[in-house]
Image: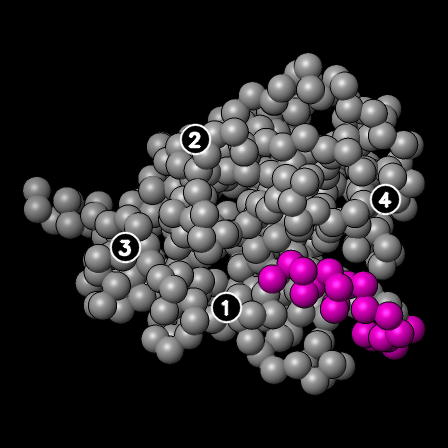
Amino acid sequence: MLLPLALISLISVADAALRTRTIPVYRPPSRDAVQRARMRSLHNEQSEALEWIQTPVEAPDIEDPYVLSQLARMAGNAYALPEGNWYELDPAFNTSFPVGWEEGEGFRGHVFLSSDNHTVVLSIKGTTLQGPTSKQDKFNDNLLFSCCCARVDFSWVFRQVCDCYRRSWRCDNTCLSKALIEDSLFYNVGVNLVNDIYMLYPNANVWLVGHSLGGAIAALLGATYGLPAIAFESPGERLAAQRLHLPTPPPTLPLPLLSQITHVYHTADPIPQGACTGINSLCAQGGYALETRCHLGKSIIFDTVTKLGWKVDVRRHVIKNVIYNVVEAEGIEWEEGRRVPLARADEDCVDCFKWTFGEFDLEESASAR
């Protein structure tokens, strides 16, 4: 997906006014090095030693309520064209151009650009229940966020998005990894798009935002390239990152790993908590197997169940609710002395505990010799 160069060159907005902060991020020496390491791990089952360079990165100040609201509005705007359900933005980023909308179904979003070309914000659309992208949205959801190809139980046999189930709650790892290199996977489209942005603006400061599926894709791309990524109400993407063979800095490094990735969600939304499951859930009834709950980076969790008295309800998942009733809610101290909860890492988080993952196809092939 190539960006329209002429259109980008015409964009002119006011100087950036959103508060930023400088954070240390570990990055490989090049974007090509990341992809080489991924492919070697995927195809040859060999890890490649990468040099991780500590780099200062200008990131949005996620502790500022106004900054967080603007990022949430950008994530919401990924669902619409400017003449539609558009959220008004700060003059710093009040002009954008669409990506993917002319291609019908598939990856969609918007790019926001500051007037000095210093900051580029890629906003990625999440799942639309009805519309041109719905089929591909659901395919990506079920491939990325289910434990094994959306094989929830025997009744889902005709809804599976890949063929990696191997009886008795067993799933083949190699099969899953190969399924995630399909061109129709939004992550792969996003990789090409980020590369296009850097070809046009090699010195740009790139941020990634998104809601739901779009936020998870933003987080995966942020992990790939060491870019600030802010994901709103997204399912857990940590398991998908492992299956995509994303190289990560070793835990022996002194700074927090993947600190550039921030998830933002509230406690009345079951989707980012991996709780929209079970035969009677609205997700399952709609054909969505959103089973994962573990996230990369850190999470800002708004306790709307306690503070606002909300009941857990998947209808609280929509970005409009998050913008107006959570992030921009007035007069609420979410934690002592804080209008934005402190970002914390997911501690001791486990996905898909009842499943066994392994190289079952290789074992069967070896035993047949």
Q: Residue at x 31, y 66 (%)?
A: 152
x and y percentages locating residue 55 in the rendered image: 77, 34
Q: Which residue is mark 1?
A: 274
User: Is the C terminus in the top left, top right, bottom left or bottom right quadrant?
Assistant: top left
What residue is rendered at 81% in x and 63% in y? 328
SS state under label 2: helix
Q: Are marks 3 and 1 in contact (CB under 8 Å)?
A: no
Residue at image position (78%, 24%) is 11
| Type of the residue with mark 3 | Gln
Give the percent coordinates (x, y) of residue 354: 35, 71
* Magenta stretch contains residue 328: yes
- Nearest-to-viewer mark from 1 and 2: 1
Whole-number angstrom distance, CA of label 1 to CA of label 2: 29 Å
Residue receiving disc 2 = 39
Q: Position of residue 206 (x, y in %)?
A: 73, 33
Residue mark closest to the camera, 3 vs 4: 4
Query: Alpha carbon of mark 4 to alpha carbon of mark 1: how far?
Result: 33 Å
Tell me the kind of residue under disc 1: Gly
Residue at the front extreme of this rendering = 83
Q: Residues within 10 Å of mark 2 (few under 14, many from 20)?
A: some
Q: Earlier in the sequence, mark 4 or mark 1?
A: 4
Work out whether mark 3 precedes mark 4 in sequence or the reverse, and give the earlier one: 4
**Magenta residues, as a range?**
318-337
Assess disc 1: are there few (<14), some (14-19) or many (≥20) residues with their C-alpha within 10 Å of its C-alpha. many
Location of mark 4 (residue): 90
Indicate which disc, 2 or 3, sits on the residue closer to the N terminus: 2
How busy is the neighbourhood of tag 3: few (under 14 within 10 Å), some, or many (20 plus)?
A: some
Label 3 and label 1: CA atoms lie apart by 19 Å
The image quarter in which residue 286 lies: bottom left
In percent of the image, x 33 and y 58: which residue is there? 150
Residue labelled with disc 3:
160
